[in-house]
Image (tube, helix red, strand yellow):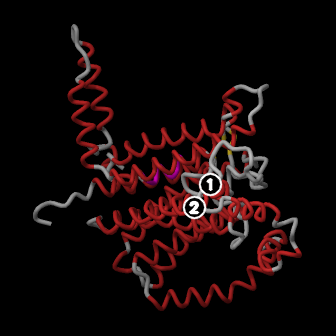
Amino acid sequence: MKSFWKQDEFSFVLCYTTYILKQCSKPGGRPGGGFLLKAIRQYIKDTDKLCILLCTLCSTLSVIALVSISYYASSAERSVFANYRMPIVQAGAAAAGLVCAIIISKIDYHSLAGAWPLHMIVTWGLVLATFIIGYAPSNTTNKSWIQLPLGLSLQPTELAKISFILTFALHLDNCRDKLNEPSTLAAILAHLGLPVLLIHFQGDDGTALIFLLIGLSMLFAAGIARKYILAGVGLGAVALPVLWFGIMADYQKERILALFHPDDYTDLLWQQNQGRISIGAGQIVGRGFFRTQHHPVPLAENDFIFSYLSEALGFVGSLLVLALLFALAAKMISTAFRSQDRLGALICVGIFAVITWQAIVNIGMNLSLLPVIGITLPLFTAGGTSVLTTYLMIGLSLSVYMHNKKTLFD
């Protein structure tokens, strides 16, 4: 822990603040603007500019869509903030997230991983707190949120994704030479299984699935032996009947059965059917934003933001959204290959898994290819916690990018 607090990158902001105060304390003194501009130019030179641009484009498109949705739901009797609360929160979360990402990128990711007791206690402590003080918003039955002042809320499992990626990457890195030994692999699977079970008992099986997919993706990238992969596939096939008959609730089974027998579950599939109609209504170039003829989709700003974007921007816009998310995921893999150590590569693989799997599941929900399980579309779905968490993860990838500069002799 001591090395974490002694890192030059971590103390950059504090040092510069102290410098400004000293300058201001002198007679006629002013902050050294030249130093600040030099630091900004150096940061722009060192950072992954394409990654930041992709995130900014995703957030901009999301805010425009949310403003469009709010525009027709607005009322003359409410304040501007009440009418446009969603896009305001989304834009604020994106701006704050970008600032946090820049700060995190200046901290060596080795130090962030080494501080695992700190962020693990905080994030998972908040997850445990939801069992006592958690509440469920109007659009869900999962009490996995914590109420905050000003009508805001926090979903701790989103923040826990960051801690899990850091701790799991560190665990895999520390046992790199013994990964395929049974005792080591058992400890790693316990590291993966405990968070999944905790979130399952919390009632948020969708997020539990994402945690499982993140861990499996990182485990695969770490080099798990093929025999264990085949054994895992076989064990999963055997466990399916147990999962279906012994663990899954009736409503979860019905959501899956509805995909194969849509005529028997028209009420259950109503939201997804409206989403598909909305996607088809966009045709090639879409109907545009801020127009009255959009097909109504319940909670379009949340899980079905992709259907709204598809109707507004058409098939071309759908491809644009997919391209932005694919490019962002590809940047994570590119940064993983750029990393000169295993820890940085595994962190980027974990972030890649979050973006990729959440996009696949969310878009699959919109297309009625997968059941609705409450998974957000990264950087697009309305939700301050989700957006802020994604930017914090982007900050981790930027840290890996910036702290792996190749020299002439590499």
Which residue, as the protein is rendered here, is positioned at the far top?
Answer: 27
User: Is disc 2 in contact with disc 1, using a CB cutoff of under 8 Å?
Assistant: yes
Is residue 269 located in the magenta-colored stretch of the structure?
no
Q: Residues within 10 Å of mark 1 (few under 14, many from 20)?
A: many
Residue found at x 41% / y 66%: 330
Residue found at x 59% / y 64%: 195
Report the disc number at residue 309.
1
User: What residue type is disc 2 on?
Assistant: Ser
Residue found at x 28% / y 26%: 18
Horizontal placement of 121 versus 240: left or right?
Answer: left
Is residue 389 located in the magenta-colored stretch of the structure?
yes
Q: Position of residue 135 (x, y in %)?
A: 75, 47
Residue found at x 68% / y 57%: 304
> Alpha carbon of mark 2 to alpha carbon of mark 1: how far?
7 Å
Q: Residues within 10 Å of mark 2 (few under 14, many from 20)?
A: many
Q: Which residue is mark 2?
A: 318
